[in-house]
Image (cartoon, rainbow, N blue to C red):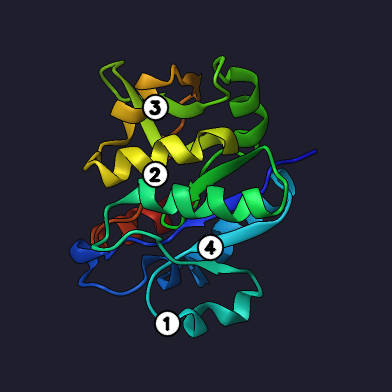
């Protein structure tokens, strides 16, 4: 059974002047439309993690899950919201993707599941031009069984994803960066121009 997919869209997009990065248009199509189209064949049910008025995302017909913790504690809060939602559906794990990353691999979920560590956790990774391996922790496979541990860690002040995933022995699924890094994400107006170049 394919795990539910959670699109993490809870960030505040400060480098883009605020608002929802996922609603920015790249080459005639919104980022979140591209992300949904790429994720849907790989997962089961989908939901969007976002804060604020959920009505702005109603057209997508997906549940909108706000962070359950205050003060925007970061992506891990979105993961926790997804885990709580999935637990109510009887799912064993979720996969997460970022709403501002339109080129993530079409075999992301398959590779994450194959790479999962003993705890069931796995994160995506790729190498930069120098050969350094970078983890992309908003792209991961997260077991529902760890949600209470994650909640306790967040309530205790933890914010850095890899500190928590390292604690639980997350596996690493490495993806090739040729011809470009599939985890290239849109943070600035200049990144939109670069994404449009890659698309065309």
Q: Where does residue 148 sit, x and y in percent of width and height? A: 46, 40
Measuring 46% from the left and 48% from the top, which residue is drawn there? 80
Question: Which numbered disc flags the more N-terminal residue, 2 or 1?
Answer: 1
Quadrant of the image containing the N terminus = top right
Left or right position of 53 against 71: right
User: Residue most toward the bottom?
Assistant: 55
Residue picked out by circle 4: 48
Tell me whether the residue at label 2 lies in contact with that at label 1, contact meaning CB atoms closer than 8 angstroms.
Answer: no
Tell me whether the residue at label 3 lies in contact with that at label 1, contact meaning CB atoms closer than 8 angstroms.
Answer: no
* Residue at disc 3, secondary structure: helix
Estimate the spatial distance between the alpha carbons at disc 3 and disc 4, rounded to whole Å: 22 Å
Q: Residues within 10 Å of mark 4 (few under 14, many from 20)?
A: many
> In terms of image quadrants, where is residue 36?
bottom right
Vertical order, 149 against 125 (above or below)? below
Q: Nearer the viewer, mark 2 or mark 1?
A: 2
* Residue at disc 1, secondary structure: loop
Measuring 71% from the left and 55% from the top, which residue is drawn there? 45
Question: Which numbered disc flags the more N-terminal residue, 3 or 1?
Answer: 1
Q: Which mark is residue 165?
A: 3
Question: Which numbered disc flags the more N-terminal residue, 4 or 2?
Answer: 4
Question: Which numbered disc flags the more N-terminal residue, 3 or 2?
Answer: 2
Estimate the spatial distance between the alpha carbons at disc 3 and disc 2, rounded to whole Å: 13 Å
Residue picked out by circle 2: 151
Estimate the spatial distance between the alpha carbons at disc 1 and disc 4, rounded to whole Å: 13 Å
> In terms of image quadrants, where is residue 105?
top right
Tell me whether the residue at label 4 lies in contact with that at label 2, contact meaning CB atoms closer than 8 angstroms.
Answer: no
Question: Which numbered disc flags the more N-terminal residue, 3 or 4?
Answer: 4
């Amino acid at each position: 059974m394919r795990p539910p997919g959670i699109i993490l869209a809870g960030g505040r997009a400060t480098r883009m002047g605020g608002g929802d990065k996922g609603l920015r248009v790249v080459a005639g199509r919104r980022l979140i439309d591209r992300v949904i189209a790429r994720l849907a064949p790989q997962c089961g049910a989908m939901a969007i993690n976002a804060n604020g008025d959920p009505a702005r995302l109603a057209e997508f017909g997906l549940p909108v899950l706000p962070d359950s913790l205050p003060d925007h504690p970061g992506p891990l809060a979105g993961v926790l919201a997804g885990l709580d939602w999935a637990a109510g559906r009887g799912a064993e794990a979720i996969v997460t993707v970022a709403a501002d990353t339109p080129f993530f691999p079409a075999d992301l979920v398959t590779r994450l599941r194959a790479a999962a560590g003993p705890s069931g956790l796995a994160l995506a990774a790729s190498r930069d031009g120098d050969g350094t391996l970078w983890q992309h922790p908003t792209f991961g496979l997260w077991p529902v069984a760890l949600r209470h541990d994650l909640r306790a860690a967040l309530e205790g002040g933890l914010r850095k994803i890899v500190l928590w995933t390292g604690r639980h022995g997350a596996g690493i699924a490495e993806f090739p960066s040729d011809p470009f890094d599939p985890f290239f994400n849109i943070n600035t107006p200049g990144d939109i121009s670069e994404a449009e170049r890659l698309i065309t």
